[in-house]
Each structure stands twice: as structure tokens, then as C-alpha cells.
Image (cartoon, helix red, strand yellow):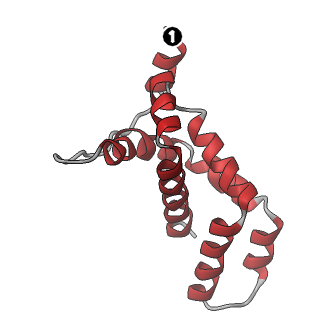
Amino acid sequence: MTNDEHLLALRTFEAEIKDNKSEVEEFQHRVLRPVLKHLNDKLWTLIKADTHFQLLLKKSLPSKEKELQLRNFIKKNNAFKYESIGMTCALFTTEEFEFYRENKRDLDKRITQMVEERVVSQF
């Protein structure tokens, strides 16, 4: 079994893909959603280890304000953003990584938004 076959075997979830999607949207549903679902526990471990997140948990703020601060943290913390993008890309096949490199700017935004939604929805 090749490395790419091993990576594909890790994906136990397939997102529903509707017709008439752009290549990037299809990639988001076919690749990003299953990979981020697979990485869910690791993303939580990564964010929980951050000092800013620990301080946010200790603050006695309304839940909406905590959610807003968490969203801001995810958007502005470059270390977290790049680690989560790197973790995601590490689970791409060679062909998927080539597509990612061609569409890096758009896919980085999508990965960051999807990570934000995944983390905030579980907060």
C-alpha cells in the first residue's frame, strides 16, 4: 500500500458533494471536511494548550463574548493558524497537495474558517 493509499484509508467520512461546484469547493467537501474531522481531537489539544485560551476559560464573561474572543484568537494567532494548516496539509495525498499549492491562498482561508467553525461549535 502506498503512502497516498494509507492517507486515503484514514478518511472514514465523506461529505456530500452537490453538482456544479467549483474545483476548490469540491476539494473543500471531498478533502478538507474529512481531514478536519479526522484532526478534531488534535486541533482541540492544540488550542487548549495555548495560554491565551486558558486565560479565556478563566474569565467570567458571557458565553457570546467568550465565543467572540475565541474567534478573534483563531483569526489573529498566526502560530495556531499555521499549525492547523500544516496539520491539515500533512494528511493530503501527493495529488491533493499539488492542488493545494496551486490554490494555496483560497484554501488557507477555507481551512482557517473551517477550523474556526469546528472549534467554536464545540466550545
Q: Is residue 117 above or below residue 100?
A: below
Q: Nearer the viewer, residue 59 or 104?
A: 104
Residue where numbered disc 1 is placed = 2
Q: Quadrant of residue 78?
A: bottom right
Kind of element beneath mark 1: loop
Count of picture labels: 1
- Left or right of 82? Residue 29 is left
Q: Position of residue 120 (x, y in %)?
A: 54, 69
Mark 1 crowdedness (10 Å alpha carbons): few <14, some 14-19, many ≥20 = few
Name the amino acid, label 1.
Answer: Thr
Residue shown at 47% from the left, 52% from the top: 106
Residue shown at 45% from the left, 33% from the top: 99
Give the quadrant of the C terminus.
bottom right
Q: In this view, does 34 lie above or below 43?
A: above
Q: In this view, does 53 lie above or below 62?
A: above
Q: Nearer the viewer, residue 70 or 22?
A: 22
For the view shown, which residue lies furthest in the left direction? 19
Residue shown at 64% from the left, 66% from the top: 74
Q: Position of residue 10 (x, y in %)?
A: 48, 29
Q: Quadrant of residue 23?
A: top left
Q: Where is residue 77 in the image (x, y as percent from the top left)?
A: 72, 64
